[in-house]
Image: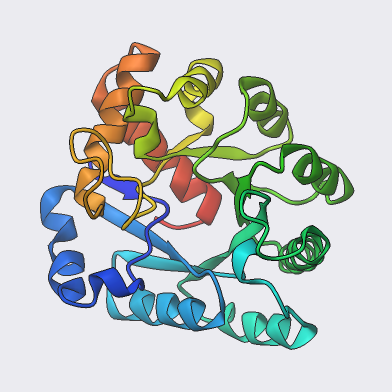
Amino acid sequence: MPIFDTHAHYDADRFDSDRDALLSAMPGVGVGLVLDPGCDLPSSRAAAELAERYPHVYAAVGVHPEDCDGFQDGDLTELRQLLERPKVVAIGEIGLDYHYEDVPRAQQRVAFEKQLSLAGELGLPVIVHEREAHGDAMDILRAHPRATGVFHCFSGSPEMALWLVERGWYIGFTGVVTFKNARRAVEAVQALPLDRILIETDCPYMAPEPHRGTRNDSSNLSYVAARIAEIKGVSVQEVEQTTWENACRVFSVR
């Protein structure tokens, strides 16, 4: 069964030396599909171009909370234009990040809400980055009940995960779930039905054990699937097949 890496940043400069070789090799190592989300307008353009170049790559476009300082309506205009491309299938990654607070929280909330509204208008899923902003994120989603998609690299509680699933969301897990200290991610996987879980690398970041600390890529996604299978007490094949079907459903791809 091929696997679907639902969050991979192959537009990142850490892949400049071997991007084509890596992406061309993915189908041969069992990675059937990859979704590359943008973090700002330049990376969104780059993700859209990668999707046009490789048949197994799709893109999302959006402005990340750490990159939204100066976000304005003109950015939405360009996002609209990028979303007209057939292989751009979602808005993301967008959201809230209160860890470093390089961008004021109020500005993050404005950018998040405007992009959620665009997604609602166009009927598209969103890819949410949320870090240390659980309460505000849930408050914003209450104000946007039509919004749906995936909370990627989930870091919240099992209760938050179930709250999201009840509202139609999917939950994405990275190599973090393989880390020895990954208590919250493991608890969330335990609590969730498998048909609401997605798997992702977030490469070049978040390499799983036993490759933690190295540059990550989609060939490592099998470790995430294996750990989730162990937690859920099911076969790796079931995890790979179900998460593939989940991702194809969320992003309307085959």
- Colour scheme in use: rainbow
Q: Can you see residue 64?
A: no
**The quadrant where residue 170 appears:** top right
The relative height of residue 35 versus residue 195 in the rendered view (above or below) is: below
Percent position (x, y) of residue 155?
A: 56, 35
The relative height of residue 99 versus residue 178 in the rendered view (above or below) is: below
Q: Nearer the viewer, residue 237 or 144?
A: 144
In the picture, which quadrant includes the N terminus? top left
Percent position (x, y) of residue 213?
A: 25, 45
In the picture, which quadrant includes the C terminus? bottom left
The relative height of residue 211 versus residue 98 in the rendered view (above or below) is: above
Residue extending farthest to the top is 233
Task: Give the total number of marks visible in the rendering.
Answer: 0
**The quadrant where residue 84 appears:** bottom right
Image side of residue 123 versus residue 54, left or right: right
- Residue under the point 50% across and 29% down: 195
Percent position (x, y) of residue 80?
A: 66, 81
Q: Nearer the viewer, residue 180 or 157?
A: 180
The relative height of residue 183 versus residue 219 in the rendered view (above or below) is: above
Percent position (x, y) of residue 127?
A: 58, 55
- Residue under the point 45% across and 72% down: 87
Image side of residue 177 versus residue 125, left or right: left
- Residue under the point 34% across and 11% down: 233
**The quadrant where residue 225 appears:** top left
Q: Nearer the viewer, residue 186 or 254?
A: 186
Q: Nearer the viewer, residue 75 or 182?
A: 182
- Residue under the point 27% across and 42% down: 221
Q: Can you see residue 179?
A: yes
